[in-house]
Image: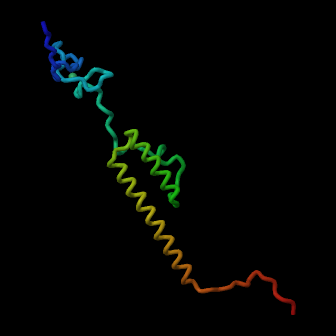
Amino acid sequence: MTQLLSAPSSTEDAPRCRHLTVNGRQCRHRVLDTQSDLCFRHARPLPMQSDSEDLSPDLLPQLSPFDSAVDINQFLARLLVLVTKGRVSPRRASVLAYITNQLLHSHHAIERKQAIDLKNEPFTVDFGDLPRPPR
Ligand SMILES: [Zn+2]
C-alpha cells in the first residue's frame, strides 16, 4: 500500500497570528513577526519618525561652525548613522544633506573670492616698524 504525500498547502499550513479578537476568535492572517507570532496588522508598529525632533545633541555634539569640509564630513557621517538606525526619515536626511552640500559649495565660492581679491590687491611694503638708518 502506498501512501500519498501531499504537498503542504502554502496558506493553510502557515502559522496564523496568535492575536485573539474580542469574540475569542484567532486572527486569520499569517505570522509576519516570528518572535511575537503576530501578523502585519497586530505586530507592534514601528515608532513614527518625527521630522521635528531635536537632533542637535546627536548631529552637533560640539557646536560646529561648519567652516571646513571636515566638519561637514563628520556631520554627514553622524547623519548616516541616524538614518540607518531609523531615527531620521530619509526625507529629512535629504534636506540636511542638501543644506550641507550648499555649505560646501559656499566654502569654495568664498575661497575663490578671497583668491581673486588677493590677486587684485596692490603690492605695498610697509616699512613702519623697521629702524631708520642713522643720519
Ligand atoms: Zn493578526
Q: Is residue 118 left or right of residue 101?
A: right
Residue at the top extreme, as displayed: 1
Residue 78 location in percent, x, y?
46, 46
Nearest to the observer: residue 81 or residue 118: 81
Residue at (13%, 9%) from the top-left corner?
Answer: 2
Residue at the front extreme, as displayed: 1
Q: Is residue 127 left or right of residue 111?
A: right
Residue 33 location in percent, x, y?
29, 25
Q: Quadrant of ligand 1?
A: top left
Residue at (74%, 83%) from the top-left corner?
Answer: 128
Nearest to the observer: residue 81 or residue 64: 81
Residue 120 location in percent, x, y?
54, 84
- 83 relative to 36, above or below: below
Residue at (46%, 48%) from the top-left corner?
Answer: 77
> Where's the N terminus, which quadrant?
top left
- 86 relative to 12, above or below: below
Nearest to the observer: residue 6 or residue 120: 6
> Where's the C terminus, which quadrant?
bottom right
Q: Could you say which quadrant of the image residue 83 lies in?
A: top left
Residue at (49%, 70%) from the top-left corner?
Answer: 110
Tally of marks: 0
Q: Is residue 135 left or right of residue 38?
A: right
Color theme of the render: rainbow
Residue at the bottom extreme, as displayed: 135
Q: Could you say which quadrant of the image residue 127 lies in?
A: bottom right
